[in-house]
Amino acid sequence: MPTSPFTPTIPPRSADPFLEPRRENCPWCGSARLRTRVRAGDPLRHRPGRFVVDQCRDCAHVFQNPRLTAEGFTFFHRDFYERHLEEFTARILSADAVRRRHRATARKLSALAEAESWLDVGTGHARFPEAAKEFFPYTSFDGLDPTARVQQAQLEERVEEAHRGYLSTPGMTARLRARYDVVSMFRHVEHAPDPRAELRAALTVLRPGGHLVVEVADPRCAFAALLGRLWLPYGQPRHLHLMPLANLRAELESLGCTILVTDRRAPHIPYDLSGAVALASAPHPLLRIAAAPLLDLASAVDHILAPLFRRTTFSNAYRIVARKDRG
């Protein structure tokens, strides 16, 4: 499986300032064997236009095509997190459920050696570092995020240092080089314009022997085929890439990492059916009210069947823990 990025000729500029030109090959392996998985509109703001998600028939990489430009991504990303995130998330996951998930993740990762410093990438309001301090009381947590939420998290003392942007933002790795024992990326790589650049940058800011934790929505989840555009992790238009576990594992190994853990059970979030109902009923307030009983039922089914889903192809995410080898 190819593990080096394919560099095509530069296509002409798109007429849409928010979209790049459509590409005819896979950004992961360069194959021209593409198929369209879904076409979806903006499910929350319902602006005109459709977003296309393609899949490579050779390496199974899933990506938005055409992709949002930097300007377009900034617009949609900021708009979602500033206007819709809390309202929409509350419909399918309670605040207590989110806290329990963060605690369970931190408990699982407590098998790692005590870290002196930890960078949580894509940290948002830094809820994971807040939960992880219970299990890593002597660890200094920093946060990095493309939105201003990370700066608010610093003011509220959930992280010690706040960094705005991406790891691959020019100058970021120079400032943070070899500063951290652990770098975590929970549901962050999906948003990165260049996932490979983010992974390389993550290893640059890790110390030799440090650990990289990556959690990603799994495009091979059976719910993706069953629910189509209503599968929540497609996340259009904000999710740019979805990588199968085999691709990400091969990439990290090619970068000199040793894979310590691959886990498709613990990262599963029980929200596939309830998320589909929430997306389908999002267009109108009256529709959301009418769908409330169905949403409650779907959420109950999600949670009741979660132990089964975690052990099957219905698991919607995976986690990799890799060690940066000293050599």
Image (cartoon, rainbow, N blue to C red):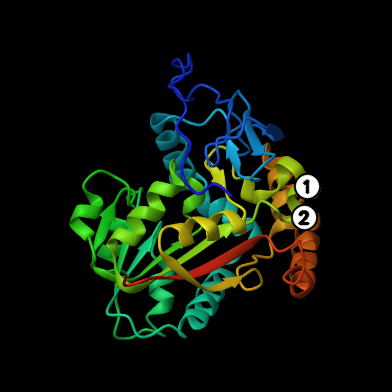
Q: Residue 119: x, y in percent?
A: 33, 66
Q: From the viewer's side, name the closer residue of 177 and 147.
A: 177
Q: From the viewer's side, name the closer residue of 50 and 199.
A: 199
Q: From the viewer's side, name the closer residue of 160 and 185.
A: 185
- C-alpha separation, residue under disc 2 versus residue under disc 1: 6 Å
- Amino acid type of the residue that numbered disc 2 sits on in the rendered structure: Ala
Q: Relative to 303, is 101 on the left or the right?
A: left
Viewport quadrant of the C terminus: bottom left
Q: Relative to 267, is 280 on the left or the right?
A: right
Q: Residue 325: x, y in percent?
A: 37, 71
Instruction: Give the residue furthest to the left.
Output: 175
Q: Residue 106: x, y in percent?
A: 47, 78
Alpha-carbon neighbours of circle 1 within 10 Å: few (<14), some, or many (≥20)?
some
**Which label belongs to residue 84?**
none
- The secondary structure type at the circle numbered 1 is helix
- Amino acid type of the residue that numbered disc 1 sits on in the rendered structure: Ala
Q: Which residue is mark 2?
A: 222
Labels 2 and 1 touching (C-beta < 8 A): yes
Q: Residue 108: x, y in percent?
A: 52, 81
Measured along the vertical axis of the image, is residue 4 above or below residue 128?
above
